[in-house]
């Protein structure tokens, strides 16, 4: 296993794109950040770090990033690479204030990071990424308007019905380093 870190989003995209696109929902934050760097929307390239984990045959088997002064963000990582990824990022961005990723990976990373740097951590929040199955737009009469107090019960029913069309894909945890 080999770890490579670059500040060049274009280079990282050419190296890791096929890996990231195998699970586009899990890697949506990373691919969006890469696109923002490549197109110039995000001008923090010199402060960003893109990390790829490579197998013996040089294929990408894991990815992570730290964009500008934000927290470390973990893509899919082989479980046996998490300690090495934490060490590699601690060497180049020891000032990172937290990590976000799939719950198990983020927890393991936070434990490794804090053991390396002698700090603690606590969970800040947990989120769930959802994927919309089929979008069905109703054919109804009327025009959009702002909801009123009398619409609260109806809106609650609609929200509950809306969640039936979503399929959870991943639970993410965010940890803050103390």
Image: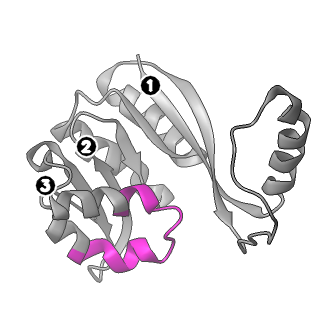
Q: Could you tell me how far apart the alpha carbons at marks 2 and 3 are, in whole angstroms?
A: 12 Å
Evaluate whether residue 1 shows in this view.
no
Q: Is residue 148 left or right of residue 92?
A: right
In the picture provided, is 107 more to the left or to the right than 13?
A: right
Q: Is residue 162 left or right of residue 52?
A: right
- Foreground label between 1 and 2: 1
Q: Earlier in the sequence, mark 2 or mark 3?
A: 3
Task: Report the residue marked by disc 1.
Answer: 176
Q: Disc 3 designates what residue?
A: 7
Q: Quadrant of residue 165?
A: bottom right
Give the extent of the magenta segment: 14-31
Q: Is residue 32 above or below residue 10?
A: above
- Label 2 belongs to which residue? 89
Residue 136 image position (x, y, % from top left): 76, 72
Find the distance from the CA under tag 1 to the CA under tag 2.
16 Å
For the N terminus, the image quarter is: bottom left
**Residue 140 percent coordinates (x, y):** 82, 66
Which residue: 24% across, 46% down? 88
Q: Which of the two labelled residues, at mark 1 and mark 2, occupies the earlier sequence position?
A: 2
Q: Secondary structure at mark 1?
A: strand
> Which percent across, then down, holds residue 94?
22, 31
- How many labels sit on residues? 3
């Amino acid at each position: 296993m080999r770890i490579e870190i670059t500040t060049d989003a274009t280079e990282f995209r050419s190296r890791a794109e096929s890996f990231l696109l195998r699970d586009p929902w899990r890697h949506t934050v990373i691919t969006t950040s890469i696109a923002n760097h490549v197109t110039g929307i995000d001008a923090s390239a010199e402060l960003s770090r893109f990390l790829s984990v490579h197998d013996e045959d040089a294929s990408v088997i894991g990815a992570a990033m730290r964009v500008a002064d934000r927290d470390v963000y973990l893509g899919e990582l082989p479980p046996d690479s998490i300690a090495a990824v934490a060490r590699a990022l601690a060497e180049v961005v020891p000032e990172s204030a937290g990590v976000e990723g799939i719950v198990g990976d983020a927890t393991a990373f936070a434990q490794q990071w804090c053991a390396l740097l002698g700090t603690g951590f606590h969970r800040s929040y947990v989120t769930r990424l959802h994927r919309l199955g089929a979008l069905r737009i109703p054919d109804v009469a009327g025009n959009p308007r702002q909801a009123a107090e009398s619409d609260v019960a109806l809106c609650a029913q609609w929200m509950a019905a809306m969640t039936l069309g979503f399929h959870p894909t991943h639970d993410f945890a965010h940890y803050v380093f103390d």
